[in-house]
Amino acid sequence: MRFFSCLKLRIHKLRIVFNYPTLRRALFFHRILAGVEHKTALNRPISTIVDIGANRGQFSLAAKIFTDANIIAFEPLPIAAGIFRKIFSHDPSVTLFNAAIGNCHERMKLHLSARDDSSSLLEIGDAQSNYFPGTHEIGSIEVDVGTLDDFMTKEDIIRPALLKLDVQGFELQALDGCQNLLENFDYIYCECSFVELYKNQKLAGDVILYLGKLGFRLSGLYNLSNDRNGNCIQADLLFTQFSD
């Protein structure tokens, strides 16, 4: 059942991609299918996007089509970062740092998945491979990790701004590393899990509680992935900053 759901989504994405020359070029020349499934979440005024866990540029490609935002992206995988740079080499509104975001400045082991967009700073668990075959661990590398304010200041964040995280179970550590700048974001868009796919990861409920204490409320739920019994495995959660 999940195979047919994934196939249906891929066909839907291809139909959208072929309507945009930029997305067609990324597909034909770099074999990157833009993350157009995020269109609804991006359908709001946004001037700055910080894309943490940018991989090969799937989300940033969609963001450039559906918004007028400047993009500051972070990707620790050297090969993925290299492809990202090739795709956006002629776009001065996009900046990439070859690093991960965490709660301190250090070198960390990145666990490599057979599908590189499932790689994580946490050890890949059995559930990840069971739910998503072909994402098992195949090795590891050392990568640079820093806090968000190691790389940018609040002056770099022109509002309204969106912080996007796709960090494979490392959400709370990455959010900790963004905390000094979080008040400058109007939205946080974060992939979260409802089951433990990576060892010792925090789940969606933990992220909701954490961001609630920092002034962000859950305002949207997108791109749900369910198991064969209808239980939710993952989803993209949108949070909006609120004021008392």
Image: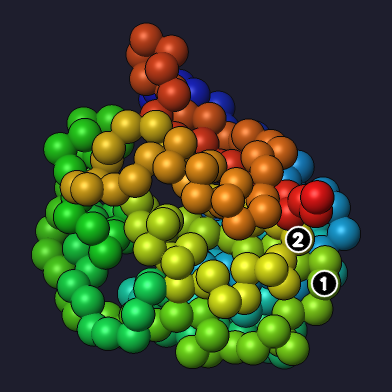
Say which quarter of the image contains residue 131.
top left
Amino acid at the residue labelled 2? Asp
Mark 2, secondary structure of its residue:
loop
- For marks 2 and 1, the one nearer the N-term is 1
Residue located at (51% from left, 36% from top): 235
Q: Which residue is mark 1?
A: 159
Q: Is residue 230 above or below residue 176?
A: above
The residue furthest front is 244
Tell how many labels.
2
Mark 1, secondary structure of its residue:
loop
Foreground pick, 164 / 27: 164
Q: Is residue 203 visible?
A: yes
Residue 186 is marked as 2
Amino acid at the residue labelled 1? Arg
Q: Position of residue 61 (x, y in %)?
A: 65, 64
Residue located at (69% from left, 84% from top): 154
Q: Position of residue 79 (x, y in %)?
A: 35, 77
The residue furthest top is 229
Residue located at (34% from left, 46% from top): 202
Q: How many residues crowd around disc 2 within 10 Å: few (fewer than 14), some, or many (20 or more)?
A: some
Mark 2 in CB contact with mark 1 (< 8 angstroms): yes
